[in-house]
Amino acid sequence: MRFGQDGGWFSPLFGLRPGRYAVLVLLAGALAAAGAAQGQTATETVVLSFANFPKGANPYAPLLRGTDGGLYGTTYEGGAENAGTVFELGAAGYKVLYSFKGGADGANPYSGVIQDSSGDLYGTTYQGGAANAGVVYRVTPSGQEKVLYSFTGGADGGHPYAGVLADSASTLYGTASTGGAGNAGVVYKVTLSGQETVLYSFTGKADGGNPYGGVMADAEGDLYGTTYGGGADLAGVVYKLTPSGTETVLHTFGKANEGGKPTAGVVRDSAGDFYGTAATVVYKLGAGGQYTVMAHLDCPTGGDAWAGVVLDAAGNIYGTTGVELPACLESSPALFGVVFKVDTAGQLKALYRFPGPPKMQNAVGNGPNAGVVLDSEGSLYGATPYSGAGGMVYKLDAAGQESALYSFSAARGGTEPIAGVIRGSTGNLYGTTRSGGAANEGAVYKADATGHETVLYSFLGGSDGADPESAVALDSAGNVYGTTRGGGAADAGVVYKVDTTGQETVLHTFTGGADGGLPNGVVLDADGNIYGTTLAGGAASQTGVQEGVVFKVDPSGQETVLYSFTGLSDGGAPIGGVIRDPAGELYGTTSEGGLGAGVIYRLSPSGDETVLYTFTGGSDGGSPFGGVTFDPAGNLYGTASGYGGPHGGGVVFELDTAGQYAVLYTFTGGDDGSTPEAGVVRDPAGNLYGTTYYGGAAGCGVVYMVDPTGQETVLHSFTGGADGANPQAGVLRDAESNLYGTTPWGGRGAHVGVDFPGAGVLYKIVLQ
């Protein structure tokens, strides 16, 4: 359910898609006012912009063994602006040579690099450039980048997946997957002065189309490669291109059991035979045009081979497979692909199985495993996105022994602040991040007014907890209390305390059974007792489903289940936490149960539940994800996000002490916002403040105010860029009427309209 490489947003229900101190960024917010209540305007300031994978993440390209013996490569994401990196791994360790900015300099390199005699590196990016259609670049050993050519996406081509090849005159040759006269890709050459020439434009017909793989050359200057599409059966071709631009199709894919749609180019042996991969096969194409399937990459060896192959002196073939084919998931141990060998007799052997990320919900890698390179001792080197937080560079020796040369780690300062913040007595803000930290399992942080961040605790993902997604509570001594959605003995979450020295104590470990599982946020009473809810667990109802609990944990760590939901008329699956009145009664909401759209409930200190309101899922809203708040008279206020109201965008509601329910505002799903996932806060004048996950001028959510007459004003409309995107948490209001909140995406490295989500922000709204 995490944010994917295709840019698709995840389910807002659970918020489940990768140390560096962030900088202070000041940004005037876009003010899309849906109303003019009191003439209210506001300015947004980004207090803290979380950094994501500063050393790079998701290496998809084969490595280069440099002239100095070091390894050089690229990452598709990560770096200073989350737009990818060029890196070196040598005797002195790992070094980012260049971090793409995601603008004119390029973004997201799928391909690797080549090196000239001066040590300069050359490659391509898939996006970025003047037209966001990719670039050809050079990076010097000192890390200076120069764009040699910026694709327009038109006749000159666009979006190169493959890297470049150089001739003796240092002219670069490559392919672009789109553009050209037939909009089916091109083969091009680029001089070091930046002059591009299209050598051939594919039509997408019998000649092939959309080349994802690069080219290789023979002694006569002829180029050879593959296309992903086109051909007689639209399954791609192997082609030859003369220096004058004449194309010859050497083989057309599409016949039964011979593979097709190749995503990598070809290699050639001394006899003139070609070798490559085409989906689930490794093939040989003889110099005379004879096509032979050398091996079928069946379930024991993984899925499609996105990368090409290399040959050793004896003619053995080496390559990698990607993530497992769906048909193999039940039976195969190669879920994340393998390094394989095919000998000259066609015998296939898995040499190494990629381990995959440590926890699936923290997986950021979702692209291909890169191909391998071979050294003179028979060792293989490669990179994979499927290990650790953001991938690794590895070595596989001739005996099949693997060693991790470098593991890409997440930001120590945390990423994805799904929960909101609370404010301490000195003005510091406290919160959690769902990812990042030392082990990429989340962190508890403190941020001061200048945007300086201190990580108070980094979760390890074991008994101490993992994936904190809820806001924290603070006691008078400065200790922080909260919950995690994962970790603990049953991976059902924990209740924890982090003291002022950074020492964590697990107060309760949920089993996922009668005591609950997947806890939400907590509140404290004057005696140090902790109250909260769990989304799952509890006593099984008559439907056989555990629908969550309301719990209390005392200072000694003793848990008491105050109420176990049945999922029926009493409600079920509380996503929001609880609030507590002076009499010790608890109030909250459930996202399910009642008539199917959730309820508002009150719980006495002895555990007796009263349903105060049952949502219908119609004009009154439904499926409230946030909790409720009080006014001095005891009236309750909140939001119902479950696509209720006449426009399906959710509502802001009031429930008075007599049990009368009123919709104060109905979101239209347009500029005024849509899908409020969090609750609201109230000022002394009766104005309510909150956030929406969707809607707004850019569809990335808003911060809003609703006055006592039901008039809404949009205080800030998130752009999805540096100012943040899609807030799941609500806002905190201070004594000066400033609002504080978080977004899980946007911020540093986020680029509007491009698939760079960023790692989230902590923002401040100043009302004027």
Image (cartoon, grey):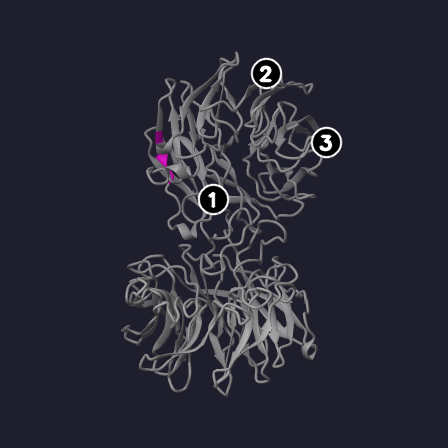
707 over 158 or under it: above or below: below
Q: Amino acid at mark 2?
A: Ala
Which one is in front, 662 or 441? 662
64 over 486 or under it: above or below: above
Residue located beneath label 3 in the image: 195
Q: Percent x, y for residue 592?
A: 42, 66
88 over 695 or under it: above or below: above
Cβ–Cβ under 8 Å for marks 1 and 2: no
Distance from the alpha carbon under mark 3 to that under mark 2: 24 Å
Distance from the alpha carbon under mark 1 to that under mark 2: 38 Å
Which range of residues does the magenta coloring cover?
350-354
Q: Which mark is residue 366?
A: 1
Residue located beneath label 2 in the image: 219
Most common SS among magenta residues: strand
Which quadrant of the figure has residue 588? bottom left
Which quadrant of the figure has residue 135? top right
Cβ–Cβ under 8 Å for marks 3 and 2: no
Q: Amino acid at mark 1?
A: Asn
- Local crowd at mark 1 within 10 Å, few (<14), some, or many (≥20)? some
